[in-house]
Image: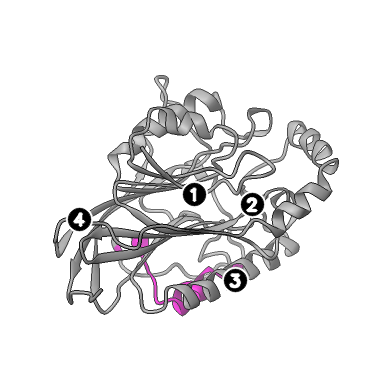
Amino acid sequence: MLQINIPYPAKRKSWNLGLLSLLTIFVSVGFMMSFKRVKASKVDSFPSYIALSDRTSGDLSLLTYNIAGLPEIISSAQTSRSSSIRRIGSRLEAFDIVNVQEDFNYHEDLYTDNLHPYRTVSMGGVPFGDGLSTLSKYPLLETQRIAWDSCSGADCLTPKGFSFSRVQLAKEVFVDVYNIHATAQDHEQALRARGSNLNQFLKFIETHSKGNALLIMGDFNAHYAFYKDHIRQFQQAMNLQDAWVSLCNAGVIPEEEVDFQAQHALMVHDGMESIDKIYFRNSDELIFKAKSYRVEKELFTNDEGEPLSDHCAVSLTLGWELKTIRKK
């Protein structure tokens, strides 16, 4: 098994006494955490080319899922974290490329029954890890982790941010895959931090993926409909196609609402905007076509029908076609 090294707004997730207790513990490691955030950005290089079949078209099955991997005492998920995340790991195998968020303290459980041949290596649990993991049936040629420059509240207790992986789909087909977990909460400090997150993310993509085909999947903690969020500007600046908008909302981005009230993440369905988003962008050479979008409620439940996380997983089937052969 080759391995490569590469939470939710106030109106959406409530704090509890367990979290307050954990925050008290984290105060004692404040200095260590500050050091860790500075060192959080990481670059790993791998072979730039792997001999794959010479295909020029195909389909990809994609999934993004916030798996609620915080320690069980502070998790807002209702089921046992260890057994639930182990079950999640086995069911991820149905998808070609998977991004998960909040993969903190149960990372071994996630990978125990999972057979994806390419998987990122965790940075560790709280407070050391960023909670971002990518699992793929296609080679990951390069990966980086980047911590946010701005954070707010409990989000500052881990090196939360985004990750980048270059994925080889076929002999001459490459795509840049990003995994993101933006700052949570909707008070003014958090909103400023989340806006800063998206601006930092945009600048990184412009520098490292200019002209490249993109897949961006993750927990943006943002809605188009919430007028104080910056997700609309980010989507437009990057010329991204939103899979849900394209397939489930007639190509129309939701209007901003001054009195917008978000539903709990588990209430999301195919006809509702989610904070868990899948974006894609074509290049001059690689063209994508969104085929089917699904909120995966039934797949990720236990034997009693209870959800395995406090978010719903979101999937997309995406066709791809290579228009021009890339020269090595």
* Residue farthest toward the front in the current orientation of the protein: 47
- Secondary structure under the numbered disc 1 in the rendered image: loop
For label 2, the residue is 9
Residue 259 locus on image (x, y percent): 61, 63
For label 1, the residue is 5
Q: Nearer the viewer, residue 79 or 93?
A: 93
* Residue farthest toward the top in the current orientation of the protein: 303
Q: Earlier in the sequence, mark 3 or mark 1?
A: 1
Amino acid bearing label 2: Pro
- Secondary structure under the numbered disc 4 in the rendered image: loop
Residue neighbourhood size for the residue with mark 1, other residues' Cα within 10 Å, grouped as few (<14), some (14–19), many (≥20):
many
Left or right, 160 with reference to 137: right
Residue neighbourhood size for the residue with mark 2, other residues' Cα within 10 Å, grouped as few (<14), some (14–19), many (≥20):
some
Q: Which residues are magenta?
A: 228-246
Figure check: 196 above or below 67? below
Amino acid bearing label 1: Asn
Amino acid bearing label 4: Leu
Q: Is residue 249 visible?
A: no
Amino acid bearing label 3: Gln
Residue 323 locus on image (x, y percent): 17, 75
* Residue 98 belongs to the span the image colors magenta: no
For label 3, the residue is 200
Q: CA distance from mark 4 to mark 2?
A: 42 Å
Q: Nearer the viewer, mark 2 or mark 1?
A: 1
Q: Given contact means CB atoms under 8 Å apart, are the residues at marks 4 and 3 in contact?
A: no
Q: How is the image coloured?
A: one colour
Q: Earlier in the sequence, mark 4 or mark 2?
A: 2
> Which residue lies at the image location 25% right of the left edge and 73% below the top edge?
328
Figure check: 240 above or below 76? below
